Amino acid sequence: CEDHLVYYRFFGRVMGRAMFDGQLVSGRMATHIYKHILSWPFHLKDLESVDEDMYRNLEELQQMAQSGEDISMLHLDFTTCTEMLGVKQEIELVKGGKDIPVDNGNFPEYIEAILKYKLMDCVNPQLKELLLGFFDVISEPLLTIFDFRELELL
């Protein structure tokens, strides 16, 4: 049902209005949403608040790659699995991802693809509506003077 998206736009407007009026909101959003509002890049640490297990696993893989261990022995590819309503689905992170093995050379691209999927692609319609509502109230250029930590405090 696409009707749920109107609530995200409404929430974006409420957030924008609260910020505009200087009202303190007791809830917090994940850090990567503030970064998305400001068009800042994501880092691996941003994944921790969304999927802690995935974050820990990727961090371990990153340590393995940095220490020179051959991560191609793990037989990973540029896909990830999701489960929705009990149905498991394999998602290609890049075009032809199931045929691209992950190795030490392309591991940074693998991390980037996972972050893009987990933090943006799988919630894109909701995030788009949230931002449209927020920018209905507060003009995007007004936010360029803040970093994501300062935006969170507003």
Image: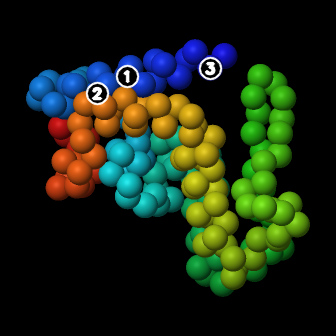
Labels 3 and 1: the sequence-earlier one: 3
Which residue is denoted by mark 1 in the rendering?
A: 11
Query: 71 or 43: nearer the eye?
Result: 43
Q: Tags 1 and 2 in contact by the CB under 8 Å rule? A: yes
Query: Where is residue 29 shown, x and y percent of the image?
Result: 37, 34
Image side of residue 131 versus residue 51, left or right: left
| Residue 100 picture quarter | bottom right
How far separated are the C-alphas under marks 2 and 3?
Answer: 21 Å
Q: Is residue 75 left or right of residue 151?
A: right
Between 100 and 55, which is closer to the camera in this rendering?
100
- Residue positioned 67% across, 66% down in the render: 110
For numbered disc 3, what is the local secondary structure? helix
Which numbered disc covers residue 2? 3
Q: Earlier in the sequence, mark 2 or mark 3?
A: 3
Q: Is residue 4 above or below residue 142?
A: above
Secondary structure state at the residue bearing disc 2: helix
**Mark 3: few, some, or many residues within 10 Å (few <14, many ≥20)?**
few
Residue 101 x/y as whole percent: 82, 71
The residue at the far left in this view is 22
Which secondary structure, mark 1?
A: helix
Circle 1 packing at 10 Å, graded few (<14), some (14-19), many (20+), is some
Residue at mark 2: 15
* In the image: residue 22, left or right of residue 47: left
Rounded to the nearest whole Å, what is the CA distance between mark 3 and mark 1? 16 Å
